[in-house]
Amino acid sequence: MTPQKSTKAIVATSLALAAISQTYAFAPPISSSRVSPTRLNVIGEQASSIGPAQVLRDLKERLPQIPWLAEGAGSPSNKIDIPDHVAQVLAQPRAPSREAESEERTEKIRNRAKQASEDAMKLRGMLTGDDDAQAWWRSQRTVPEGGRAVTKDDPLTVLVAGGGLAGLVVAAACHSKGMKVALFEQASSYAPYGGPIQIQSNALRALQQINPEIFEELVAAGTCTADRVSGLKIGYKKGNKLAGLYDAGDWLVRFDTVGPALEAGLPATVVVDRPVIQQILVKYGFPENTVRIKSRIEQFEDLGKGRGVAVTLKDGTKAYGDVLVGADGIWSQVRKNLHGLDDGAGGFAASGAAGGALDDAEARKLARDTVQIAAKADRRFSGFTCYAALAPHRASNIENVSYQILLGEKKYFVSTDGGGERQQWFALIREPAGGVDPEPTPEDPHPKLTRLRNEFACTGSGDDDDNVWDPFALELINASSEEDIKRRDLYDGAPLLTTLDPQRLLSPWAKGPVALCGDAAHPMMPNLGQGGCQATEDGYRLVEELASVQHTRDVPWALGGYSRVRVIRTAIIQGFAQLGSDLLVDFDLMMTLPLLGPFFLTMTQLSMPFILRYLYTPSF
């Protein structure tokens, strides 16, 4: 088989698996079981494997178990962090070379994140006071029926809902093309929240094309993660002599992210603190007074015939523009109105700007409310709840590993270098939506830590399933405080449209002068780290289409073209992310199946470079 045919075969296999994943992901669970309270205090209907994985799991349980087959140690080669094939790529002259974290750099990164958070809290660059009262978008201009010409002196006017990454990128792209732009964020401030974001090579290219200064500032502020190995590890001892033996923490799949980036001529992936990203975009992306906080867009009216859109904010304020872009997150109010969804489909969400404003009490209420919102918003519960924190800790493998996933049945643990001797980690656990942790008590003042220490126990009999985990998970969990650990259920959306509406099939994310982007259009699981990256691509492509408009009557056609271009690519990436999420918790099953297990691992290893090549395209 030629290299070209081999590449096509692997990509075709990956896409077929993604399609299968979509079919099962949006089907109702085949079975579930009601369980009694465990020592982890988990009560309720437990999510279970569905589709082929469940068939294999049931079959395996019926076969005779031979303990002797599971005895022995894993291969020494699976304990090497950087194998030869990765070392060769990292040694290329154009590849970034690893610079060990120093005390000076650590302090610089942490202080910049702290300063960005303080600036945000002080509303620097935000629209307030007299400037707010005189804002251009408050006045409805007289536009003749049929619209008006768009010129350099009388450019398009764009209203953006949502001040997270998607909204900020759209605003920066609009300004770079000479458009007037106003951004409305529902949060009361750009509060410090969440952890750093990986800005992967494809997103960096989009930002470079939008505004080179933003690109340069982000790269300078970031920590390169493409200079080390990434991959999948088994969380605990697993396997047998027929399928392969693996000790806790052994590598299953290792890959680099810099090779595909270099092939496409793209910059290497960096990780940057969210407040720093926000402040760079606010400072270099558009003029001061562009962003108005405490401004949730509730409704809009298409004025028709090229005359733009009228928006109503929650406080009753009116805003007028030629275009409205809904970048207001997975529970988008703009999407709710655009698609005529039921009341309640556009609920409050921990959006890009508001995420850190939620305390534990608010998070508990939101977890329960979100179950109802999701049903009305036609969003899919992934089957996972996610605990996350940014641990101020120098990881024991920091010089060799930038990103790794410890895999297990019903759960997995993700960690990535956050820069400044910090580790961003996520613990994803299969369980029903709407679950909450107990409130702290004198007997258990740290309920989230208590649960996680049991879920990833590395001593004694291990977790509830008697699996003794690799100690790296607890290394990071124990370096985090109870207050810093946040929990949320993970939702995403159907990769392709689940509708027969001709208008939506022709223009999936747009109608008239209104369009969606980012999570409002295509929420996805975090496995590939592409949620924010695809939102960045959206912003670039959307504004490129708008930049060709010479008359306001052409706005709907430009927005429709944007959504048609983007929907296929984002659907494929959504499918990959869903496939990855569904398969990660079944890797433990594959480790015990003769022939199928080694074949599955080999195909995963071979397919990763091609998946990355698809992600890291220079054009989108």
Image (spheres, rainbow, N blue to C red):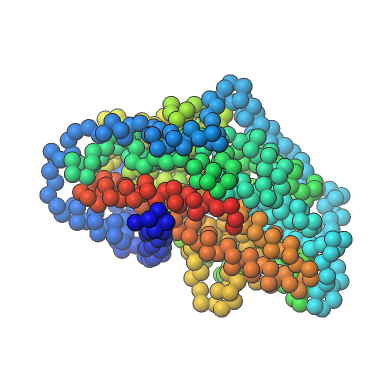
State which quadrant residue 237 falls in: top left
Residue 373, percent across and down?
Answer: 52, 61
Horizontal side of residue 565 vs 39, given as left or right: right
- Which quarter of the rendering shows the C terminus? bottom right
Residue at far top of view:
103
Q: Residue at horizontal 39%, vertical 51%?
A: 607
Residue 501, percent across and down?
Answer: 55, 77
Task: Choose between 187 and 415: the one closer to the eye.
Answer: 415
Residue 585, above or below 21 = above
Horizontal side of residue 498 vs 280, given as left or right: left
Horizontal side of residue 218 vs 471, given as left or right: right
Task: Choose between 296 and 569: the one closer to the eye.
Answer: 569
Whether residue 321 is visible: yes
Residue 34, percent across and down?
Answer: 30, 55
State which quadrant residue 325 falls in: bottom right
Whether residue 482 is visible: no
Q: Residue at horizontal 60%, vertical 49%?
A: 203
Residue 111, percent across and down?
Answer: 65, 28
Q: Residue at horizontal 83%, vertical 70%?
A: 149
Q: Residue at horizontal 55%, vertical 36%?
A: 94
